[in-house]
């Protein structure tokens, strides 16, 4: 699977994929599901849908991305039902307010330590709008490409990129607040470097722009602690997985047992 783009997913493949992906899916659900939507139910729903759709999977995407896309779509449907913000091209448009670009931190290490605590990280993530939260988690925790993120939200890659940048700064700011560091804004002279510095962290700047950022970092007192915090945050976000899976495992067993009984019954009816 994966290498063979024409292969369909067998039941055995399916079970193997969900077995290896279940922890990651649950971590993703816990980071994204707002209050009122149980992460384990969300994973359960996604797995049930994936089970029903498994014959249609042709290995075009990595099975992980396929499962995560199903979960994302399920989450969006639930948010719509609950009347919450739904990530669409409209809500994904960035507001003109650029204050997020001026976020400063004084003590990056405290912010990084807070982010390394999954509960504190989750609390901070949940102060972001659902769309920002999804964008940063899919990118920095799950390693989705900008193109895949743009596709699932039906926005341009440029808009997806900006959304992720904004979410990173807002997450740093939420952790700053949670750790009791005073708020202050970087001066106007930092704006240009900040627009570039997120691309700088992703390693996708050309030589000229890279030099420009480094030159700014050398003489600025506001930006270096922020850059340090952002680097640490990305490290902290990179998926850690929760071992508490008992309920999920049970519910997964129920799906598979149900399917088994259904098929066995069908076989009996044919006799
Ligand atoms: Zn600066």
Image: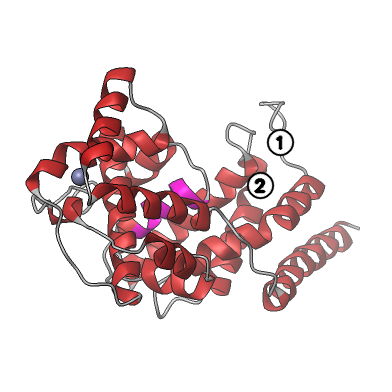
- Of the residues under marks 1 and 2, which one precedes in the sequence? 1
The stretch of residues the image draws in magenta is 133-141
Instruction: Say which residue appears at 42% left-offset and 68% top-offset.
Output: 110
Q: Is residue 156 visible?
A: no
Measured from the top left, where is residue 31 in percent x and y? 47, 66
* Residue 143 vs residue 72, the one in the foreground: 143
Figure check: 222 above or below 105: above
Q: Residue furthest right?
A: 271
Which residue is at the front of the view, 35 or 175?
175
* SS for callout 1: loop
Quadrant in which the N terminus is drawn:
top right
Residue with the mark numbered 1 = 8
Q: Which residue is mark 2?
A: 54
Observer able to see residue 209: yes
User: Which sits in the foreground, 79 or 22?
Assistant: 22
Q: Does residue 79 belong to the magenta stretch?
A: no
Q: Are circles 1 and 2 on residues that touch, CB within 8 Å?
A: yes
**Residue occupying the point 18% across, 47% down:** 93
């Amino acid at each position: 699977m994966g290498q063979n783009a024409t292969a369909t997913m067998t039941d055995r493949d399916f079970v193997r994929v969900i077995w290896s992906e279940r922890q990651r899916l649950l971590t993703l659900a816990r980071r994204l599901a707002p209050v009122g939507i149980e992460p384990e139910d969300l994973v359960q729903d996604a797995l049930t849908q994936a089970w029903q759709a498994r014959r249609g999977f042709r290995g075009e995407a990595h099975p992980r991305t396929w499962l995560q896309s199903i979960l994302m779509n399920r989450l969006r449907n639930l948010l719509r039902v609950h009347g919450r913000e739904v990530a669409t091209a409209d809500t994904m448009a960035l507001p003109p307010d650029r204050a997020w670009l001026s976020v400063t931190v004084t003590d990056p290490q405290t912010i990084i330590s807070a982010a390394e605590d999954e509960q504190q990280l989750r609390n901070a993530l949940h102060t972001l709008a659902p769309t920002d939260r999804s964008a940063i988690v899919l990118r920095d925790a799950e390693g989705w490409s900008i193109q895949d993120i743009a596709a699932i939200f039906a926005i341009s890659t440029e808009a997806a990129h900006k959304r992720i940048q904004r979410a990173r700064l807002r997450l740093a700011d939420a952790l700053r607040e949670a750790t009791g560091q005073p708020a202050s804004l970087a001066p106007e002279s930092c704006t240009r470097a900040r627009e570039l510095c997120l691309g700088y962290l992703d390693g996708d700047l050309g030589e000229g722009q890279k030099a420009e950022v480094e030159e700014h970092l050398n003489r600025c007192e506001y930006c270096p602690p922020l850059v340090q915090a952002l680097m640490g945050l990305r490290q902290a976000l990179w998926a850690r997985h929760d071992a508490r899976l008992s309920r999920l495992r049970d519910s997964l067993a129920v799906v598979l047992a149900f399917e088994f009984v259904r098929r066995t019954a069908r076989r009996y009816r044919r006799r």
